[in-house]
Amino acid sequence: MKVVFLDIDGVLNRLALIGSGGRPLDRLDAAAVSRLGEIVARSGAKVVISSSWRAHRTLDELRAMLSELGFSGEVIDKTPELEASLYGDPFLVRAREIKAWIEAQREPIESYVILDDAYLDEAAQHLVKTETTAGLLDEHVALALEILGERHS
């Protein structure tokens, strides 16, 4: 199985949208959601939510938000929430949450990519780091596909 670990803030939205109020859906960038869809369609990867958004929304709510913007990929799970105080650094926690999710799977993980606007040192070889001010761009799609073992055309 191929997996995309998805942060939302700074990936599917950008800084200008994050504080804009309204419904959470209004803070997502449809173009970034479309780019996520391209990654998933081209690679066959499944999506696991690693964003802090997972703490206050059910998996069904997260799926519905993405679906409303045209995303048709499969969102299969959320990463576990580990105690941040055990690690000190919130970005170290995110990398450990991803590692814990991978270790808990029965199905082998063929490849995975992490889409995040934070630098996750422990998982750098799997990371496509976006900029909070821009979100997921075309160049990130190409890199994500490469990490997943796909060719981008």
Image (cartoon, rainbow, N blue to C red):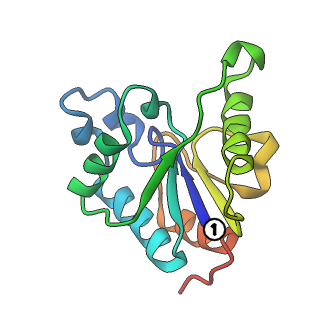
Mark 1, residue position: 143
Question: How many numbered tags mark residues here?
Answer: 1
Describe residue 85's horizontal placement relative to residue 75 as left or right.
right
SS type, badge 1: helix
Q: Measured from the top left, where is residue 79 in percent x and y?
A: 57, 40
The residue located at (38%, 42%) in the rendering is 59
Describe residue 56's horizontal placement relative to residue 118 as left or right.
left
The image quadrant that residue 1 belongs to is bottom right
The residue located at (53%, 87%) in the rendering is 153
The residue located at (41%, 48%) in the rendering is 12
The residue located at (31%, 36%) in the rendering is 17
Q: Measured from the top left, where is residue 149 in percent x and y?
A: 69, 77
- Give the camera-side residue of 135 and 95: 95
14 over 93 or under it: above or below? below
132 over 148 or under it: above or below? above
Q: Measured from the top left, where is residue 117 in percent x and y?
A: 57, 42
